Image (tube, rainbow, N blue to C red):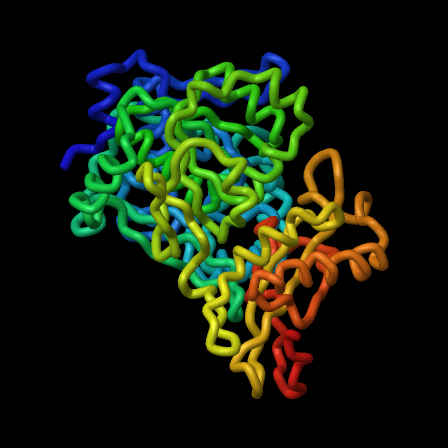
Amino acid sequence: MPDLLTVHAANHPDEPAVIDDRGGGDVRRRTYAELEARSNQLAHVLLEHGVRAGDKVVWCGQNSIGIVEMVNASRKLGSTAVPLNYRLSDEEAAYVTDHSDARLVVVDAAYAGLCDRIRGDVPMVQSVLVFDGLAPAGAVACDPLVDAASCEPPVEDRGEAAAGATMVYTSGTTGKPKGAYRRQGSNPGQTAALLQHVGYRTDDVYPTTGPLYHSGPGGFMAIGLAMGQTIVLQYKFDPEDWRRLLETYRCTSTFAAPTPTRMICNLPADTIARFDRSSMRVMIANAAPWSFALKQRYVDGFQTVDDVAYRDDEGFLYICDRKKDMIISRGMNVYPAEIEAVLEHHPDIYEAAVFGIPSEEWGKSCTRSSSAGPVPNSATTASSTTPATTSRATRCPARCRGWTSCRRPAPARSSNVNSWPPSGRIEPRMSEPRTTAATPRQPR
C-alpha cells in the first residue's frame, strides 16, 4: 500500500497540511508537498543513524511541526515511534526510554537537557538528535542534516512492519508504566467504519486539544493527515488561545479529554463570547470519565467505548459512566459519575473522583477524592487558588446528604488532592486506598 502522505502530496501538493500557530504572529506552516519532503529527509537521517523497520525511536517535545515530521518519518521506515511525556521526572523518562529498547531519541531543543541528564541510564540509546535549536554536548543537531538529505521517499525493505507502529506508555497506575504497542493500519475495515460513523471529511480542520504524546490527540491527528485534512497545532495548551485557533482556522473536529474541556468551558463568559465556535461539528470525548455536569456544557456529539449510556426520544445519546467503574453497594448499582456531577456543582470543588472501596457489610462503599483548584497552567497553580479545607469539610457532606434523598449513597470517606499527577487529572484508582484492613464507615 502506498504511503498516504506521499499520495496526498502528489494529488494536492499546495493544500495546507500542518499549521503551527504560537500566537503573536509566530505562525509556521507546511503544505502537503513540504511535509512530504521534510518527512522524507528526516527518514533518511534516521536511516543514517541506524534505524530500521521495527526499531524503536523515542521522540520528546511539545506540539510542533518537528514532531509531526518525526511521526511521519518513523512510519515511512516502518519503525515504532515511542512518545516520551516531557513532564516526567528524570527517573521516569529514563525508565520509559530504556524499557522501550529505543536506539535513537529525537527531541525538541527545549527538552534536550532532560535527555542529556538521563543519557547514562539508557545504554541502548546510540544517538540523540535535537531539532529546533542548539544541541548539547554529546547530542547531534538534526536540522542541518535534514536540510542536506534527499527529499525522495526512503527505499527500505520494511516487511511486515510496512505501516509502522506506535508504542504509548500508560500512566502506570498499577506499577511501572507499560508500553501499549499498536501497529498502524492493522484493521482498516474497523477504522473505515469508525470514520464513517463519526462523519469525518477530507476537508476537516483538526486542532490539537492536548499534547500529542497522549494517544488520543496524536492518534486522531494521524487519522486527519491520512485523510488529507489540515492539522492546527497548539504548542502548549491554553484554553483561551484554543478558542482563538478555533475561530481563526474555522476548525471542524477534534479529540478532547475532560480536563482541557473543563478549562475551555470555565473561561469567563465575555471571553467565550468573543470567539466564534460555529464551525466545530465533530468532537470526540474520551480519555477519562466525563461527569454529567461537564457533558451538559460540551458541544456537538461524542463517541464512546464500553460506556453506560441512554438514548432519548430524539435519538441523542447521553453517557452516564464507564461500566467498569460501576459500584455495587447494598445490592444497588451506583454510577460514580452521578455523584461526581453533584460534587462538581459545589463552589469549592473543581474536580472530583468517586470510587468504591471494599466493605464487609455492604460489598463496597463510596469514597470521593477531590481537588479545589484548577489544573496548573502557565498562569495558575493548584496551591494558589485552594480554598480553606474547613470550608470543604463543612459544606460537602450537606451536598451529599441531598443526594442520598434520591436513594444514592453519599461518599463514606473523603479526601482532598493538593497535587496533580502528570496526566493533569484525578485518577480514581490512584486515589483509592492501598489497604483495606479497617472497615470504613458505612453510608447512612
Asked if one can make out residue 45 in the rendered structure from this viewpoint, the answer is no
Question: How many numbered circles does the render carry?
Answer: 0
The residue at the point 45 percent across, 63 percent down is 178
Work out which quarter of the rendered image holds the N terminus and state it.
top left
Query: Residue 408, position in %: x, y?
Result: 56, 65
Towards the viewer: 96 or 319: 319
The residue at the point 30 percent across, 20 percent down is 203
Query: Residue 271, position in %: x, y?
Result: 65, 21
Q: Horizontally, is 294 left or right of 32 in the view?
A: right
Query: Residue 394, position in %: x, y?
Result: 81, 60
Work out which quarter of the rendered image holds the C terminus and state it.
bottom right
Q: Residue furthest left?
A: 1
The residue at the point 48 percent across, 27 percent down is 233
Query: Residue 305, position in %: x, y?
Result: 34, 52
Towards the viewer: 435 or 133: 435
Q: Residue furthest front?
A: 405
The residue at the point 37 percent across, 25 percent down is 38
**117 lies above or below 5:** below
Towards the viewer: 161 or 198: 198
**146 lies above or below 383:** above
Q: Horizontally, is 231 left or right of 370 in the view?
A: left
Asked if one can make out residue 328 in the rendered structure from this viewpoint, the answer is yes
Q: Horizontally, is 263 left or right of 251 in the view?
A: right
